[in-house]
Amino acid sequence: MNEKVRLAPVGLGRWARVLARGALRGDVIELYSCYSRSEEKRKAFQEEFGIPRSAATYEELLADPDLEGVIVTTPNDTHRQVIVQALEAGKAVYTDKPIAHTLEDAAAIKEAVERSGLAFAVGHSARRLGGHRVMKEWIESGRIGRISLAEANFSNERGLELNPDTWRWYADKSPGGTLIQLGVHHADTLQYLLGPVVAVSAHARRLYTAAEVPDAVMCILEFESGALGYLGCGWASPGVYQMRLQGTEANLMYDLDFTHWDESHQADRWSTLVSQAYGESVRPPVEIPPTDMFREQLEEFALAIRGRATVEVGADEAIRALAVVHAALRSSDRRGAAVEVGELMQEVGAKI
Amino acid sequence: MNEKVRLAPVGLGRWARVLARGALRGDVIELYSCYSRSEEKRKAFQEEFGIPRSAATYEELLADPDLEGVIVTTPNDTHRQVIVQALEAGKAVYTDKPIAHTLEDAAAIKEAVERSGLAFAVGHSARRLGGHRVMKEWIESGRIGRISLAEANFSNERGLELNPDTWRWYADKSPGGTLIQLGVHHADTLQYLLGPVVAVSAHARRLYTAAEVPDAVMCILEFESGALGYLGCGWASPGVYQMRLQGTEANLMYDLDFTHWDESHQADRWSTLVSQAYGESVRPPVEIPPTDMFREQLEEFALAIRGRATVEVGADEAIRALAVVHAALRSSDRRGAAVEVGELMQEVGAKI
C-alpha cells in the first residue's frame, strides 16, 4: 500500500485506546484525526497516540475530505446517530459491538449502510481468535463430526463495579447488561461456527449488581442445523471465556484467560484449545495459529475502504448476534418460552 | 462391626458388577446372595464375586431371613415393583439412580419406604466425588461468595451405541435418554450444592441416536436461592463430566475424566478442580480429598440398616433430582417455557 488509510477514532474512552493500539501494531492505518465532545480527552488522546489533529465538532471531523473512515466506540445507544451521520457524510464506519442497543436502531443502520454503499464493519472480534478459527476448520473438514451441543460462557466482574455515572448502568442504554456487552460476542461466534440461530429460550436475572441490568443470564439457542447451543453470561464473578463443541467424532474445549483480552496480539498465548477423542484420557492440545483480532478487523475494514478486502462482519452478521440478545430478553420476560429470531426481525422490518 | 451386613445384588448386569467391586473394597458388606431371572447370569456373578448362594426366584431371595437388604440395578421401569416387593418383605433397599423412571413410581416408592420404616438409599453417587465435597465446603464457608451461575455437563457416546435389545432404547422405559441416565446425577449434585430447583426450562432433541430417546438436552434451572443453573447432557460425543460455579469471590471449575468413572476409588485421581480469583491468570488447583463414591454410599446404606449411619440420599433427594428431569421434558414439549417442579409434585401427590 502506497498510502495508509486515514481513520479517526470517535468516542475516546478506554476501548478507543485498545483499538488504537491494535491499529498501530500494523502499517495499514493512519490515525489521522479523532473526536470526542471533551477537548481534554481529544488532547490527551492525540498526545498518547501521536495523532496530528482533532476536530472540535463531529461535523467538522466528517467535513474533512481527506478522512476516509471513523472508528466508533461511543455508547451503544448513540451508535445509530453517530454511524448514520458518518455514512451520510461519505465516511466508512467501523463500530464496536453491538451494532446498536436495539434492533430498530440496527435496522436503521443497515439501511443507511446500503444507501451509502460504503464499507461498514462491526467489531465482533472474538470469532477471529485463533481458537475459534481452528474450531471452524474442524467443523468444515468434518474432523469434529456432527455437532449436537455447543456451550459458551463469557463472564466478568463488571456488574459489581458499575455506578450510575456509566451508561452501562442503565437498562434503556444497555439492555441485557452482561448479555449485550459480553454475550453478544459468543452470539456472533456461535453463529459463525454453527450457522443461524432460529429461536432462543432464556432467563435473565439481576442478582448482585446495583445497576439496572442483568448480571446473570442463561440462554438456550436453537440452531437451524438442529444443534442446541448454550450461552451463559455473568457479571458478578472472576472472568470466564470458554466454549466447548461436542461432536460425533471429537470434542473441542477452548478456554481463554480474559485478563489478557485487551492485548489481542497476545490473546492466543493465554488460550488453550484441547481436543478429546473417544475413550482417551489424554486431551491433546491443538495448536492455535497466532492472531491479533483487533488489528486484523481494523485492517480488513481499512483495506475494504480501498476495495482490497471484504468485511467479514457487517450489518447482517451483527444484527443476527443482536437478535439473539433481544430474543433472549423477550424469552426471559416469558419465563423461558422460545422466541423466534424471525419474529423480531419482522417487527423491525429487517431482512437478513 | 462384629458381623458384616448381608446384602444381595438384584439385576446382575454391568452396573451390578461395578457396585459389587465397590462393596468388596471395604469390610462392611457381605455379598450374601444374588438374584437375576437368568440362571446363567446368577452362576457367573456368584463365581466372579465368590458369593455363596443365589435365589431361583425373587420371592425365594426375599424369603431368606438372614438377608438384610438388596442392591437394585434392574431397569428403571422395574424399580417400583422390585423395590416395593423388597420393602414389603422387610428388606432394606439400595437402588441405582434414578429412583424410578416416572414421578408416579417414585412417589409410590417413597410411600412404601415410609410405611416400612426400613433403610432406603438411592445411588446419586456423584455428589460424593471429592471435587463436589470441596465445592460444598467452599459454599458453606463463604469462600466462593454468592453464586450467580452454576453450569454442569454430563455426556458420553451411549446414544450412538444403543440398540433395540436394551431398555435404554425406549422412551417409555428411559424417558429423557441422556438426561435421565446421566443428567440426573448433576440434577442431584446441583441441588445438594445450591438448594432446591423451583422451575426448569429445557430443550431436548433426538439428533444422532437411532434410539427413541433424546441425545441432546439443555436445561436452565431456576434455584430457590435466585441463582441460575445450566445442565447440558449429550449422548453423541466423547465423555464430559464438568461443573463450574461462579461466585462473587471466586470461581471453581471441576473436570472429571469419565473414562475412569467405574473405578470410583480412582475417580479423584482423574479429576481436576481449579479455583480462580479476580485478576489472576494462575488458576491454582484445589486439593481433592480421596473418596470412593460407590463403596461409601453402599457402606453408609449397610450401616444405616444397623442404625449406625444416616442415609444421605433417600427418597426425597432422589425425587427432587427426578423432578428436574420430568420438568425439563415437559418444558421441552412447551418449547422452553418454565415448568414448576411444584406443579409436577402436586400431580403425583408427592410432598418433599
Image (cartoon, coloured by chain):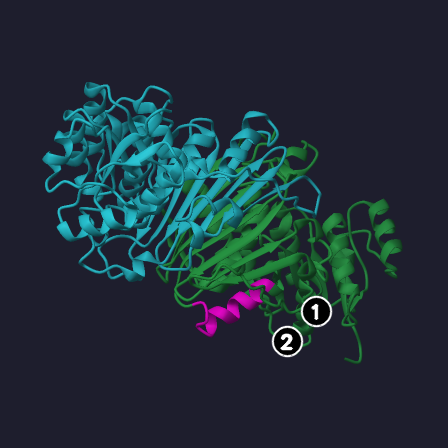
Chain colours: A green, B cyan
Image quadrant in which the N terminus of chain A is located: bottom right
Region of the chain picked out in magenta, as a range: A131-144
Magenta stretch: includes residue A90: no
Q: Residue at x 20, y 37 (%)?
A: B79
Residue B325 screen position, x and y as percent: 31, 40
Residue A111 visible, this angle:
no
Magenta stretch: includes residue A134: yes
> Is the residue B243 above or below the residue A302 in the image?
above
Residue A173's image quarter?
top right
Image position of B311 (left or right of A255): left
For disc 1, the marked residue is A299
Q: Chain of mark 2?
A: A
Mark 1 neighbour class, 10 Å CA radius: few under 14, some 14 to 19, many 20 or more: many
Main secondary structure found in the magenta portion: helix
> Is the residue B1 above or below the residue A289 in the image?
above
Secondary-structure class at tag 1: helix
